[in-house]
Image (tube, helix red, strand yellow):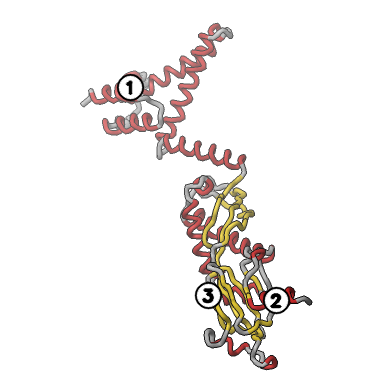
Protein backbone atom coordinates (compact mmCIF):
# COMPACT_ATOMS: atom_id res chain seq x y z
CA UNK A 1 0.00 0.00 0.00
CA UNK A 2 1.39 3.41 -1.01
CA UNK A 3 1.62 6.38 1.30
CA UNK A 4 -1.34 8.10 -0.41
CA UNK A 5 -3.55 5.01 0.00
CA UNK A 6 -2.57 4.74 3.65
CA UNK A 7 -3.47 8.38 4.26
CA UNK A 8 -6.83 7.99 2.55
CA UNK A 9 -7.58 4.84 4.58
CA UNK A 10 -6.65 6.57 7.82
CA UNK A 11 -8.88 9.54 6.99
CA UNK A 12 -11.81 7.24 6.33
CA UNK A 13 -11.26 5.51 9.67
CA UNK A 14 -11.15 8.83 11.50
CA UNK A 15 -14.28 10.21 9.79
CA UNK A 16 -17.52 8.40 10.57
CA UNK A 17 -20.67 9.55 8.80
CA UNK A 18 -23.56 8.25 6.75
CA UNK A 19 -22.60 8.09 3.04
CA UNK A 20 -24.62 10.26 0.65
CA UNK A 21 -25.82 7.14 -1.16
CA UNK A 22 -27.59 6.03 2.04
CA UNK A 23 -29.24 9.33 2.99
CA UNK A 24 -32.64 7.95 2.05
CA UNK A 25 -32.46 5.04 4.51
CA UNK A 26 -34.45 5.45 7.68
CA UNK A 27 -32.00 3.09 9.43
CA UNK A 28 -28.35 2.84 8.35
CA UNK A 29 -25.62 0.76 10.00
CA UNK A 30 -21.98 1.88 9.83
CA UNK A 31 -20.12 -1.09 8.32
CA UNK A 32 -16.96 -1.04 10.50
CA UNK A 33 -17.32 -1.78 14.24
CA UNK A 34 -13.70 -0.75 14.89
CA UNK A 35 -13.54 2.98 15.65
CA UNK A 36 -10.26 4.77 16.46
CA UNK A 37 -10.29 7.01 19.50
CA UNK A 38 -10.66 10.70 18.65
CA UNK A 39 -12.40 9.80 15.38
CA UNK A 40 -14.70 12.49 13.99
CA UNK A 41 -18.37 11.55 14.01
CA UNK A 42 -20.68 13.64 11.81
CA UNK A 43 -24.40 13.39 12.55
CA UNK A 44 -26.83 15.16 10.22
CA UNK A 45 -29.47 17.63 11.39
CA UNK A 46 -32.19 15.07 10.70
CA UNK A 47 -30.65 12.03 12.35
CA UNK A 48 -29.22 10.48 15.52
CA UNK A 49 -26.26 8.11 15.99
CA UNK A 50 -26.83 5.13 18.30
CA UNK A 51 -24.04 3.00 19.81
CA UNK A 52 -24.54 -0.69 20.63
CA UNK A 53 -22.21 -3.28 22.12
CA UNK A 54 -22.99 -6.97 21.89
CA UNK A 55 -26.54 -6.07 20.83
CA UNK A 56 -27.18 -3.84 23.87
CA UNK A 57 -27.82 -0.10 23.61
CA UNK A 58 -25.01 1.99 25.16
CA UNK A 59 -25.70 5.61 24.21
CA UNK A 60 -26.60 8.05 21.44
CA UNK A 61 -25.27 11.29 19.98
CA UNK A 62 -27.36 14.01 18.32
CA UNK A 63 -26.70 16.27 15.31
CA UNK A 64 -23.30 17.91 14.86
CA UNK A 65 -19.63 17.02 14.46
CA UNK A 66 -18.19 15.26 17.48
CA UNK A 67 -14.77 13.97 18.58
CA UNK A 68 -15.16 10.45 19.95
CA UNK A 69 -13.28 10.39 23.23
CA UNK A 70 -14.39 9.49 26.73
CA UNK A 71 -13.89 13.02 28.07
CA UNK A 72 -16.64 14.20 25.70
CA UNK A 73 -18.85 11.14 25.87
CA UNK A 74 -18.48 9.13 29.09
CA UNK A 75 -20.51 6.19 27.80
CA UNK A 76 -17.68 5.49 25.32
CA UNK A 77 -15.61 4.09 28.21
CA UNK A 78 -17.79 1.00 28.01
CA UNK A 79 -16.71 0.52 24.40
CA UNK A 80 -12.92 0.66 24.79
CA UNK A 81 -11.09 -2.36 23.38
CA UNK A 82 -8.47 -3.23 25.99
CA UNK A 83 -6.56 -5.46 23.59
CA UNK A 84 -5.57 -2.41 21.53
CA UNK A 85 -4.21 -0.50 24.49
CA UNK A 86 -7.34 1.67 24.73
CA UNK A 87 -6.84 3.24 21.29
CA UNK A 88 -9.91 1.66 19.66
CA UNK A 89 -13.62 1.54 20.42
CA UNK A 90 -15.55 -1.60 19.51
CA UNK A 91 -19.14 -0.71 18.76
CA UNK A 92 -21.96 -0.92 16.25
CA UNK A 93 -22.98 2.56 15.12
CA UNK A 94 -26.47 3.13 13.72
CA UNK A 95 -27.71 6.28 12.03
CA UNK A 96 -31.48 6.83 12.47
CA UNK A 97 -33.36 9.37 10.32
CA UNK A 98 -35.63 11.50 12.53
CA UNK A 99 -37.29 13.67 9.86
CA UNK A 100 -40.66 12.93 8.28
CA UNK A 101 -40.30 10.57 5.32
CA UNK A 102 -43.09 10.57 2.73
CA UNK A 103 -44.03 8.64 -0.39
CA UNK A 104 -45.26 5.34 1.06
CA UNK A 105 -48.33 3.92 -0.71
CA UNK A 106 -51.30 2.02 0.64
CA UNK A 107 -54.51 0.70 -0.86
CA UNK A 108 -56.91 -2.20 -0.81
CA UNK A 109 -60.45 -3.37 -0.16
CA UNK A 110 -62.32 -2.17 2.87
CA UNK A 111 -64.87 -4.89 2.13
CA UNK A 112 -68.64 -4.98 1.64
CA UNK A 113 -70.18 -2.35 3.89
CA UNK A 114 -73.90 -1.75 4.39
CA UNK A 115 -75.12 1.67 3.38
CA UNK A 116 -77.44 2.82 6.20
CA UNK A 117 -79.57 4.93 3.86
CA UNK A 118 -80.41 2.24 1.29
CA UNK A 119 -79.61 -0.98 3.16
CA UNK A 120 -77.44 -2.26 0.30
CA UNK A 121 -74.06 -3.93 0.89
CA UNK A 122 -71.53 -2.15 -1.35
CA UNK A 123 -67.92 -3.17 -2.05
CA UNK A 124 -65.73 -0.30 -0.85
CA UNK A 125 -62.06 0.44 -1.57
CA UNK A 126 -59.48 2.90 -0.28
CA UNK A 127 -56.08 4.14 -1.45
CA UNK A 128 -53.59 6.93 -0.86
CA UNK A 129 -50.12 7.53 0.49
CA UNK A 130 -48.66 8.30 3.90
CA UNK A 131 -45.57 9.63 5.66
CA UNK A 132 -43.81 8.15 8.70
CA UNK A 133 -41.44 9.54 11.30
CA UNK A 134 -39.24 8.08 14.03
CA UNK A 135 -40.32 9.10 17.53
CA UNK A 136 -37.94 6.88 19.55
CA UNK A 137 -34.76 5.76 17.78
CA UNK A 138 -33.93 3.06 20.35
CA UNK A 139 -37.34 1.42 19.87
CA UNK A 140 -36.93 1.62 16.10
CA UNK A 141 -33.78 -0.52 16.26
CA UNK A 142 -35.69 -3.16 18.19
CA UNK A 143 -38.47 -3.06 15.60
CA UNK A 144 -36.34 -3.21 12.45
CA UNK A 145 -33.66 -5.48 13.87
CA UNK A 146 -29.95 -5.41 13.24
CA UNK A 147 -29.97 -4.28 9.63
CA UNK A 148 -30.27 -1.20 7.48
CA UNK A 149 -33.75 -0.27 6.25
CA UNK A 150 -34.88 2.04 3.45
CA UNK A 151 -38.43 0.88 2.78
CA UNK A 152 -38.41 -2.92 2.48
CA UNK A 153 -41.71 -4.48 1.42
CA UNK A 154 -41.82 -6.50 4.65
CA UNK A 155 -42.16 -3.36 6.75
CA UNK A 156 -44.16 -1.35 4.22
CA UNK A 157 -46.64 -4.22 4.07
CA UNK A 158 -46.90 -4.20 7.85
CA UNK A 159 -47.59 -0.47 7.99
CA UNK A 160 -50.11 -0.82 5.17
CA UNK A 161 -51.99 -3.58 6.97
CA UNK A 162 -52.24 -1.46 10.13
CA UNK A 163 -53.62 1.45 8.12
CA UNK A 164 -56.21 -0.61 6.28
CA UNK A 165 -57.35 -2.29 9.49
CA UNK A 166 -57.84 1.08 11.18
CA UNK A 167 -59.59 2.60 8.14
CA UNK A 168 -62.05 -0.32 8.08
CA UNK A 169 -62.87 0.30 11.73
CA UNK A 170 -63.42 4.04 11.22
CA UNK A 171 -65.61 3.67 8.11
CA UNK A 172 -67.68 1.00 9.86
CA UNK A 173 -68.15 3.39 12.79
CA UNK A 174 -69.35 6.15 10.45
CA UNK A 175 -71.84 3.87 8.68
CA UNK A 176 -73.07 1.71 11.54
CA UNK A 177 -72.85 3.97 14.60
CA UNK A 178 -73.24 7.45 13.13
CA UNK A 179 -75.53 6.33 10.25
CA UNK A 180 -73.67 8.41 7.67
CA UNK A 181 -74.72 7.69 4.08
CA UNK A 182 -72.06 5.86 2.07
CA UNK A 183 -72.12 8.47 -0.71
CA UNK A 184 -71.26 11.12 1.88
CA UNK A 185 -68.20 9.07 2.84
CA UNK A 186 -67.05 8.56 -0.77
CA UNK A 187 -67.77 12.16 -1.77
CA UNK A 188 -64.70 13.45 0.08
CA UNK A 189 -66.75 15.64 2.40
CA UNK A 190 -65.53 13.67 5.43
CA UNK A 191 -61.96 13.05 4.26
CA UNK A 192 -60.30 15.26 6.88
CA UNK A 193 -62.39 13.77 9.68
CA UNK A 194 -61.56 10.20 8.61
CA UNK A 195 -57.85 11.05 8.18
CA UNK A 196 -57.50 12.55 11.65
CA UNK A 197 -59.32 9.65 13.30
CA UNK A 198 -57.28 7.04 11.40
CA UNK A 199 -53.94 8.69 12.21
CA UNK A 200 -54.80 9.04 15.89
CA UNK A 201 -56.02 5.46 16.15
CA UNK A 202 -53.16 3.80 14.26
CA UNK A 203 -50.51 5.73 16.21
CA UNK A 204 -52.04 5.19 19.64
CA UNK A 205 -53.03 1.58 19.08
CA UNK A 206 -50.57 -0.03 16.69
CA UNK A 207 -47.35 2.02 16.40
CA UNK A 208 -46.67 3.59 19.79
CA UNK A 209 -44.56 0.62 20.94
CA UNK A 210 -42.37 0.64 17.83
CA UNK A 211 -40.92 4.16 18.02
CA UNK A 212 -42.72 5.22 14.80
CA UNK A 213 -45.73 7.31 13.91
CA UNK A 214 -47.72 8.07 10.78
CA UNK A 215 -47.64 11.84 10.35
CA UNK A 216 -50.19 12.41 7.61
CA UNK A 217 -52.14 10.81 4.77
CA UNK A 218 -52.08 12.11 1.21
CA UNK A 219 -54.42 11.59 -1.76
CA UNK A 220 -56.73 9.73 0.61
CA UNK A 221 -59.73 8.37 -1.32
CA UNK A 222 -62.60 6.10 -0.30
CA UNK A 223 -64.31 4.80 -3.45
CA UNK A 224 -66.93 2.42 -4.82
CA UNK A 225 -67.64 1.19 -8.34
CA UNK A 226 -69.33 3.61 -10.75
CA UNK A 227 -72.32 1.31 -11.23
CA UNK A 228 -72.80 1.04 -7.46
CA UNK A 229 -72.60 4.82 -7.16
CA UNK A 230 -75.28 5.23 -9.86
CA UNK A 231 -77.52 2.69 -8.08
CA UNK A 232 -77.24 4.51 -4.75
CA UNK A 233 -77.94 7.90 -6.35
CA UNK A 234 -81.14 6.56 -7.96
CA UNK A 235 -82.28 5.03 -4.67
CA UNK A 236 -81.55 8.28 -2.80
CA UNK A 237 -83.57 10.19 -5.42
CA UNK A 238 -86.54 7.83 -5.09
CA UNK A 239 -86.49 8.14 -1.31
CA UNK A 240 -86.40 11.94 -1.56
CA UNK A 241 -89.45 11.92 -3.82
CA UNK A 242 -91.32 9.68 -1.40
CA UNK A 243 -90.52 12.02 1.47
CA UNK A 244 -91.78 14.96 -0.57
CA UNK A 245 -95.08 13.15 -1.04
CA UNK A 246 -95.77 13.34 2.68
CA UNK A 247 -95.20 11.41 5.86
CA UNK A 248 -98.66 9.78 6.08
CA UNK A 249 -100.62 7.44 3.85
CA UNK A 250 -103.27 10.05 3.03
CA UNK A 251 -100.75 12.40 1.46
CA UNK A 252 -99.07 9.46 -0.25
CA UNK A 253 -102.35 8.37 -1.85
CA UNK A 254 -103.09 11.95 -2.94
CA UNK A 255 -99.66 12.18 -4.51
CA UNK A 256 -100.11 8.94 -6.42
CA UNK A 257 -103.60 9.88 -7.65
CA UNK A 258 -102.58 13.34 -8.76
CA UNK A 259 -99.45 12.08 -10.49
CA UNK A 260 -101.47 9.42 -12.35
CA UNK A 261 -104.10 12.00 -13.29
CA UNK A 262 -101.57 14.39 -14.75
CA UNK A 263 -99.93 11.56 -16.67
CA UNK A 264 -103.26 10.46 -18.21
CA UNK A 265 -104.25 14.02 -19.06
CA UNK A 266 -100.93 14.59 -20.77
CA UNK A 267 -101.35 11.35 -22.70
CA UNK A 268 -104.87 12.28 -23.81
CA UNK A 269 -103.92 15.77 -24.89
CA UNK A 270 -100.83 14.49 -26.71
CA UNK A 271 -102.79 11.89 -28.67
CA UNK A 272 -105.51 14.40 -29.50
CA UNK A 273 -103.12 17.04 -30.81
CA UNK A 274 -100.48 14.77 -32.32
CA UNK A 275 -100.31 13.53 -35.82
CA UNK A 276 -100.66 9.90 -34.85
CA UNK A 277 -104.42 9.83 -35.20
CA UNK A 278 -104.94 9.60 -31.49
CA UNK A 279 -107.51 12.40 -31.65
CA UNK A 280 -109.89 10.07 -33.49
CA UNK A 281 -109.66 7.47 -30.76
CA UNK A 282 -112.38 8.26 -28.21
CA UNK A 283 -110.97 5.74 -25.74
CA UNK A 284 -107.61 7.50 -25.51
CA UNK A 285 -109.09 11.00 -25.44
CA UNK A 286 -111.77 9.91 -23.03
CA UNK A 287 -109.26 8.36 -20.69
CA UNK A 288 -107.33 11.61 -20.43
CA UNK A 289 -110.48 13.71 -19.99
CA UNK A 290 -111.89 11.23 -17.52
CA UNK A 291 -108.82 11.42 -15.32
CA UNK A 292 -108.86 15.19 -15.65
CA UNK A 293 -112.48 15.25 -14.51
CA UNK A 294 -111.57 13.01 -11.60
CA UNK A 295 -108.87 15.48 -10.64
CA UNK A 296 -111.31 18.36 -10.94
CA UNK A 297 -113.79 16.49 -8.76
CA UNK A 298 -111.07 15.89 -6.15
CA UNK A 299 -110.21 19.60 -6.01
CA UNK A 300 -113.91 20.47 -5.96
CA UNK A 301 -114.46 18.25 -2.93
CA UNK A 302 -111.39 19.74 -1.26
CA UNK A 303 -112.65 23.30 -1.86
CA UNK A 304 -116.34 22.57 -1.16
CA UNK A 305 -116.74 19.58 1.14
CA UNK A 306 -120.58 19.74 0.89
CA UNK A 307 -120.69 19.38 -2.90
CA UNK A 308 -120.41 15.61 -2.92
CA UNK A 309 -123.16 15.17 -0.42
CA UNK A 310 -125.45 17.53 -2.38
CA UNK A 311 -124.97 15.69 -5.69
CA UNK A 312 -125.33 12.22 -4.26
CA UNK A 313 -128.57 10.49 -5.47
CA UNK A 314 -131.33 9.95 -2.94
CA UNK A 315 -131.59 6.41 -1.69
CA UNK A 316 -134.47 4.36 -3.12
CA UNK A 317 -135.69 3.50 0.33
CA UNK A 318 -134.56 5.16 3.50
CA UNK A 319 -133.25 2.71 6.03
CA UNK A 320 -134.97 2.33 9.33
CA UNK A 321 -132.15 4.21 10.99
CA UNK A 322 -129.71 6.20 8.79
CA UNK A 323 -126.09 5.87 9.85
CA UNK A 324 -124.39 8.94 11.16
CA UNK A 325 -123.01 11.03 8.31
CA UNK A 326 -119.23 11.46 8.29
CA UNK A 327 -118.22 14.88 9.46
CA UNK A 328 -117.03 17.20 6.68
CA UNK A 329 -113.30 18.03 6.76
CA UNK A 330 -112.52 21.13 8.71
CA UNK A 331 -111.03 24.24 7.19
CA UNK A 332 -107.73 23.39 8.84
CA UNK A 333 -107.73 19.87 7.34
CA UNK A 334 -108.47 21.21 3.85
CA UNK A 335 -105.62 23.71 4.11
CA UNK A 336 -103.28 21.01 5.40
CA UNK A 337 -104.15 18.72 2.49
CA UNK A 338 -103.61 21.52 -0.01
CA UNK A 339 -100.24 22.31 1.60
CA UNK A 340 -99.25 18.63 1.30
CA UNK A 341 -99.90 18.70 -2.45
CA UNK A 342 -97.79 21.81 -2.84
CA UNK A 343 -94.91 20.34 -0.77
CA UNK A 344 -95.02 17.28 -3.00
CA UNK A 345 -94.29 19.53 -5.97
CA UNK A 346 -97.65 18.81 -7.59
CA UNK A 347 -98.91 22.40 -7.40
CA UNK A 348 -96.96 25.48 -8.34
CA UNK A 349 -97.16 28.67 -6.26
CA UNK A 350 -99.90 30.23 -8.37
CA UNK A 351 -102.15 27.18 -8.21
CA UNK A 352 -101.56 26.84 -4.49
CA UNK A 353 -102.43 30.47 -3.77
CA UNK A 354 -105.57 30.34 -5.92
CA UNK A 355 -106.90 27.18 -4.24
CA UNK A 356 -106.00 28.51 -0.81
CA UNK A 357 -107.93 31.70 -1.48
CA UNK A 358 -111.01 29.70 -2.48
CA UNK A 359 -110.88 27.67 0.73
CA UNK A 360 -110.44 30.75 2.88
CA UNK A 361 -113.66 32.21 1.40
CA UNK A 362 -115.56 29.79 3.66
CA UNK A 363 -114.35 31.68 6.71
Labelled pair 1, 2 in contact (Cβ < 8 Å): no
Q: Name the residue rendered at 52%, 17% in the picture.
A: 267
Q: Nearer the viewer, residue 336 or 298?
A: 336
Between the residue at mark 2 and the residue at mark 3, the CA separation in whole angstroms equals 28 Å
Asked if residue 334 is positioned above or below residue 228 in the image, the reply reads: above
Say which residue label 3 marks. 62
Say which residue label 1 marks. 350
Between the residue at mark 1 and the residue at mark 2, the CA separation in whole angstroms equals 100 Å
Q: Name the residue rendered at 32%, 29% in the picture.
A: 322
Asked if residue 220 is positioned above or below residue 41 in the image, the reply reads: above
Sort mark 1 into few (<14), some (14-19) or many (20+) by Cα contacts within 10 Å.
Answer: few
The picture quadrant where one finds residue 1 is: bottom right
Say which residue label 2 marks. 7
Q: Secondary structure at mark 1?
A: helix
Where is residue 225? Give x, y as percent.
Answer: 62, 44
Labelled pair 2, 3 in contact (Cβ < 8 Å): no
Where is residue 140? Give x, y as percent.
Answer: 59, 73
Sort mark 2 into few (<14), some (14-19) or many (20+) by Cα contacts within 10 Å.
Answer: few
Q: Secondary structure at mark 2?
A: helix
Q: Nearer the viewer, residue 101 or 126?
A: 101
Q: Name the residue rendered at 49%, 46% in the picture.
A: 184
Q: Nearer the viewer, residue 35 or 270?
A: 35
Q: Name the residue rendered at 51%, 58% in the picture.
A: 173
Which of labels 1 and 2 is toward the front? Answer: 2
Where is residue 139? Give x, y as percent.
Answer: 58, 76
Q: Earlier in the sequence, mark 2 or mark 3?
A: 2
Q: Earlier in the sequence, mark 1 or mark 2?
A: 2
Q: Earlier in the sequence, mark 3 or mark 1?
A: 3
Sort mark 3 into few (<14), some (14-19) or many (20+) by Cα contacts within 10 Å.
Answer: some
The picture quadrant where one finds residue 254 is: top left
Which residue extends farthest left? 363
Asked if residue 4 is positioned above or below residue 130 in the image, the reply reads: below
Amino acid sequence: MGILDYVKSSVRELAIARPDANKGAIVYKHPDPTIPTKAQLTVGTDEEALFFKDGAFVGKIGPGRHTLETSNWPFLSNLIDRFTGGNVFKAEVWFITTREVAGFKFGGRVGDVEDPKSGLAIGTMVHGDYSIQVTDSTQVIQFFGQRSWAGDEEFIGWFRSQLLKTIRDRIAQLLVVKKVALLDVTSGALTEEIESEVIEAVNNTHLKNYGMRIVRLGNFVVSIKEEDEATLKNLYKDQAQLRMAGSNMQNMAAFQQLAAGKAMMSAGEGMAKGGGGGGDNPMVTGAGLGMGMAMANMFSQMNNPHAHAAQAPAPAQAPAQAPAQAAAPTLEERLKKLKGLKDAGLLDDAEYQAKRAEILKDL
